[in-house]
Image (cartoon, helix red, strand yellow):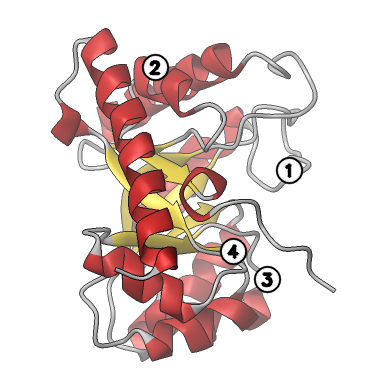
Amino acid sequence: MTDRKAELAANLAQVEERIASSCAAAGREREEVTLIVVTKTYPASDVRILHELGVRHVAENRDQDAAPKATACADLSLTWHFVGQLQTNKVRSVTSYADIVQSVDRTKLVTALSAAAVRGERELGCLIQVALDAESGERGERGGVAPDGVEELAAAIGAAPGLRLDGLMTVAPLAGEYAGRQRAAFDRLMEISSRLRAGHPAANMVSAGMSGDLEDAVAAGATHVRVGTAVLGVRPRLG
């Protein structure tokens, strides 16, 4: 086993223990929570090692990094998640490799994703990114739609050819009433998810929690956690 593989295996084991312990504490089955490893800034070689170690869900946030990496790993059985703020001019590229876009936050993006998915003869899973720091009609500091805009976006995705409404995503906000209150933020997301599922029963995916707060996300009921640093190490500085 290479040094890097041993390092990633040890890190994965620690994250797995955290998830399993959190599930046990919350009275949940471990199988209810899917680990997504966020591989941004790390090479395709790491993705290959992660696959060898059993990881099947990976995430990227920049198309210029993700596209060549996905191509280099096209022979692997992986589900690719796009989690970054997405400009419409990158949509065609992103829909060529992403299985799920977790950062849908405006109807213009829904329209662009739908057109690209139809053109590529693909069905693309979509999560609505909820900004818990956004006022009505605004977007969040790190993207996302205000809670009162979720239903309109859900209807747009549900009616869009080539798209599938899978659920919701959030990033714990750095400002506003939920700043520093991750558990409260994730509980609020679960409330919004419950309302969404009343009209869209299949939209039951809830993506929340990262390296520093995955326990709070699992306790609240998240179905997916997005972990980068705790698995791959401290990210190298870019530039």
- Say which amino acid is labelled 1: Arg
- Quadrant the C terminus occupies: bottom right
Q: Mark 4: which secondary structure?
A: loop
Tag shown at residue 139: 1
- Say which amino acid is labelled 2: Ala
For the residues bearing labels 3 and 1, Cβ distance under 8 angstroms: no
Residue at 54% from the left image edge and 37% from the top image edge: 170
Q: Residues within 10 Å of mark 2 (few under 14, many from 20)?
A: many
Question: Reading the chain from its start, which is encountered first: label 1 or label 2?
Answer: 1
Q: Is residue 198 above or below residue 208?
A: above
Q: Quadrant of residue 207?
A: top left
Name the residue beneath numbered marker 4: 61
Q: Is residue 10 visible?
A: yes
Name the residue beneath numbered marker 3: 87
Question: Reading the chain from its start, which is encountered first: label 2 or label 4?
Answer: 4
Q: Is residue 25 left or right of residue 227?
A: left
Question: Reading the chain from its start, which is encountered first: label 4 or label 1?
Answer: 4
Q: Mark 1: which secondary structure?
A: loop
For the residues bearing labels 4 and 3, Cβ distance under 8 angstroms: no
Whole-Å distance between the Cαs marked 4 and 3? Answer: 11 Å
Residue at 62% from the left image edge and 30% from the top image edge: 172
- Say which amino acid is labelled 4: Asn
